[in-house]
Image (tube, rainbow, N blue to C red):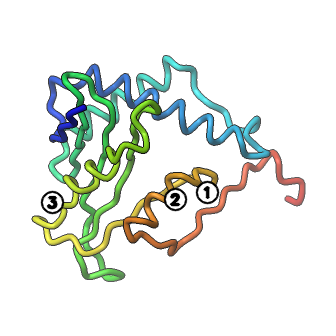
């Protein structure tokens, strides 16, 4: 199986949108493992598709955001969205954030995520990026292990409070 990685183009929109919706569904499934998942109000599939469509349109136009896609033949089997962040007084290095990395289940554990990261890092190195950050669900153990193998380390914790489940306030 030959895998190619390249930047997404406007002509990839519909295929990429389908994959973004699958990624959204995957993250909802992950959230279902949390005890408070019933409290999370999710949009319908149609609403999520509209949201992903708008976000994809913005990302494809944004000069500081790049979407890398992995293909086998004409089929998009994975993608990665990376954005350059503005420098500020807290960090005087050029920074970037991996916003999303998703590979279809059938193609996981085949080094596709690694290929996407490698291609994205060529781009980030050309922009003199020194710090790359990402968020990952704490119960997405395989993704955490993947990122740790690549050298990522936990630096911050994001905590969530769903107000209707908190009886103390």
Task: Find numbered disc 1 in the image and state the secondary structure of the residue it sits on.
Answer: loop
Given the current orientation, which residue lies at the most extreme right position? 167
Which residue occupies the foreground of this view, 8 or 114?
114
Residue holding disc 1: 138
x, y percent for residue 161: 71, 55
x, y percent for residue 162: 73, 49
Q: Residue at x 22, y 36 (%)?
A: 3
Q: Which mark is residue 144?
A: 2
Q: Residue at x 46, y 66 (%)?
A: 148
Asked whether the residues under the numbered discs 2 and 1 touch, taking CB atoms below 8 Å apart as contact, a structural biologist would say yes
Res 70 → quadrant: top left
Q: Quadrant of the N terminus?
A: top left
Mark 2 packing: few (<14 Cα in 10 Å), some, or many (20+)?
some
Task: Find numbered disc 3 in the image and state the secondary structure of the residue it sits on.
Answer: helix
- Residue depth check, mark 2 versus mark 1: number of the one nearer the observer: 2
Relative to 80, say whether 12 is above or below. Answer: above
Residue holding disc 3: 122
- Cα distance, mark 2 to mark 1? 8 Å
Which residue occupies the foreground of this view, 29 or 87?
29
- Cα distance, mark 3 to mark 1? 28 Å
């Amino acid at each position: 199986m030959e895998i190619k990685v390249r930047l997404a183009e406007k002509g990839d929109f519909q295929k990429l949108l389908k994959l973004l919706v699958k990624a959204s569904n995957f993250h909802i499934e992950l959230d279902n493992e949390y005890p408070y998942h019933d409290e999370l109000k999710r949009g319908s599939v149609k609403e999520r598709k509209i949201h992903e469509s708008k976000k994809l349109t913005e990302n494809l136009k944004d000069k500081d955001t790049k979407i890398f896609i992995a293909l086998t033949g004409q089929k998009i089997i994975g993608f990665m969205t990376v954005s350059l962040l503005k420098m500020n007084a807290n960090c005087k290095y050029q920074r970037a954030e991996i916003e999303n990395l998703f590979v279809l289940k059938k193609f996981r554990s085949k080094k596709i995520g690694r290929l996407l990261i490698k291609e994205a890092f060529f781009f980030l190195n050309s922009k003199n990026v020194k710090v790359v950050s990402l968020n990952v669900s704490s119960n997405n153990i395989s993704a955490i292990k993947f990122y740790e193998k690549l050298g990522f380390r936990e630096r911050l914790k994001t905590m969530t409070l769903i107000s209707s489940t908190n009886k103390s306030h």
